[in-house]
Amino acid sequence: MAGVGVVDAADTWMVQEPFEKWLAMVAVPGGNDSNAGTVLVWRSPTGLAQHVAITVGGGYALHKPSQGWMSPRKVLTSREVIASARQSGRRFSRYTLVGAV
């Protein structure tokens, strides 16, 4: 959320409820990894968001690999980000930003 300009999101412990509310307000299912503004979401088997990244265009995506303060924010190819967050049982989906952030 901070990657697309949501005020104070970078300094807030983000849990599922505010994230899901935000996603429902600003995005629709689907997207393209080459375009900027595709939200990449990995969910648990019960449907809870476990990891999120955002594409920045040109086949690249921004993500923070962990919630630890020491974990750097990274820009990698979209394929690398998708592969790095794979875990058994997780479902992966894409959303395109369409509303105000």
Image (cartoon, rainbow, N blue to C red):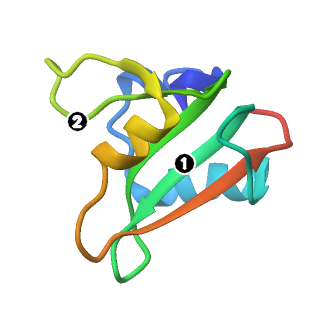
* Horizontal and vertical percent position of residue 22: 64, 49
- 60 lies left or right of 22: left
- 42 lies left or right of 33: left
Discs 1, 2 touching: Cβ within 8 Å: no
Tally of numbered tags: 2
Callout 1 amino acid? Leu
Residue of label 2: 67
Residue of label 1: 40
Occupied quadrant, residue 33: top right
Q: In this orientation, does residue 29 appear?
A: yes
Question: Residue at position x 48%, y 28% from top?
Answer: 77
Q: Nearer the viewer, residue 61 or 80?
A: 80
- 101 lies left or right of 15: right
Quadrant assignment for the C terminus: top right
Question: Residue at position x 61%, y 28% from top?
Answer: 59
* Horizontal and vertical percent position of residue 96: 75, 47
Q: In this orientation, does residue 6 appear?
A: no
Occupied quadrant, residue 97: top right
Q: Nearer the viewer, residue 20 or 51?
A: 51
10 Å crowding of disc 2: few (<14), some (14-19), many (20+): few
Quadrant assignment for the N terminus: top right
10 Å crowding of disc 1: few (<14), some (14-19), many (20+): many
